[in-house]
Image: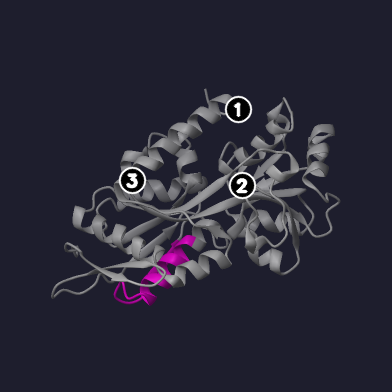
Amino acid sequence: MKKLSVCVFIVFSMISFVMITPTWSGQKKPSGCECLAPAGAGGGWDFTCRVPAAQLMQKLDLIDGAMKVVNMSGSGGGKAFAHVVTSRNTDESLIVAASAATATRLAQKVYGDYKADDVRWVGALGMDYGVVVVGKDAPYKTLDDLVNQLKSDPRKAPIVGASSVGGWDHIKMLLVAKEAGIKNLRSINYIPFDNGGKALLEVVSGRAAAFTGDTSEIIGQLNAGEVRVLAVLSDNPVPALGDAKTAKSQGYNVIGGNWRAFYAPAGISDDAYGFWVSAVKAVAGSPEWTELREKNGLAEFTSFGKDFDTFVRKQIENVASISRELNIIK
């Protein structure tokens, strides 16, 4: 297996950003790289692999040749996680898309006995704020309208999302319901799908009342006029969502951000790990990513290497605490 050498960091001072580009003295950049998206096409993990990884790492000349993107859906990302741990633990050409949903499932033991220590946490390069979305012809015009339906007869308002029951998308809707004073959170009719694209189609077709997911997942359908945003779960409005109101501005103090990030196999060398950390840093600091990030509704958020590892572990602790409070886990 090809080993990656120690990276030499060259810092380019630019007017509006600092770019850190990994290079090799007398050696080639890594080739045959792959990004594994733990879900089908059309969702946030797929976006994370295809844009900041496959598109920009090649464009910024961080890798040699194209990066292959492989979709592996199943068990809310658990199939891909297990595949990395059991079959590709030392594969230095591989990175995997991750998010707050990954931390949520680890916190709730959705991935069985697998834990944060079983991979190496590389870095995050954006925050994808949660949204509550309905179809363009849905009867719900405001978040209050949907909440009132959930209070009166939740069975008539199925909510869909890309996470498993008890996963991050589900939790976001439960937090809104809890803030609204709904006591029986288990009454919320949540239906999981294996990726955001499939779940969103249920809303577009009118088969589901609302979609709970992330900004990047709904931009295409929003721009096509197929959906309306009832609320974005951020402190401030997200420019990519037009005049969509925050839940907070509507009286629901709920913030739900889904960071977009990568992990790598646990058995790779420190040199390889250092390369992937520096490559993600380079993408995050590029004007190309800034433009694409803003276009796709992601807010600025970065964390890398050891700092990101600490951040993920703290998030797992926090999600476990919330999940116990909501009676999702004991």
Contact check, label 1 and label 3, Cβ < 8 Å: no
Distance (Cα) linking label 2 and label 1: 23 Å
* Numbered label attached to residue 307: 3
Distance (Cα) linking label 1 and label 3: 29 Å
- Residue under numbered circle 2: 235
Image quarter where the N terminus lies is bottom left
Q: Earlier in the sequence, mark 3 or mark 2?
A: 2
Q: Earlier in the sequence, mark 2 or mark 1?
A: 2
Q: Which residues are magenta?
A: 48-70
Residue at (60%, 27%) from the top-left corner?
A: 326
- Closest to the observer: 324 or 115? 324
Quick one: label 2, few (<14), some, or many (20+) residues within 10 Å? some
Q: Earlier in the sequence, mark 1 or mark 3?
A: 3
What is the secondary structure assignment of the residue under circle 3? helix
Rendered location of residue 107, percent (x, y): 46, 34
Residue at (68%, 29%) from the top-left corner?
A: 186
Where is 201 relative to 145, above or below?
A: below
Q: Amino acid at mark 3?
A: Asp
* Numbered label attached to residue 70: none
Q: Residue furthest top?
A: 330
- Residue under numbered circle 1: 326
Quick one: label 3, few (<14), some, or many (20+) residues within 10 Å? few
- In the image, taking residue 131 as reference, residue 48 lies left or right, namely left
- In the image, taking residue 140 as reference, residue 308 lies left or right, namely left
Where is 122 relative to 152, above or below?
A: below
Q: Amino acid at mark 2?
A: Asp
What is the secondary structure assignment of the residue under circle 2? loop
On whether residue 56 falls in the magenta region, the answer is: yes
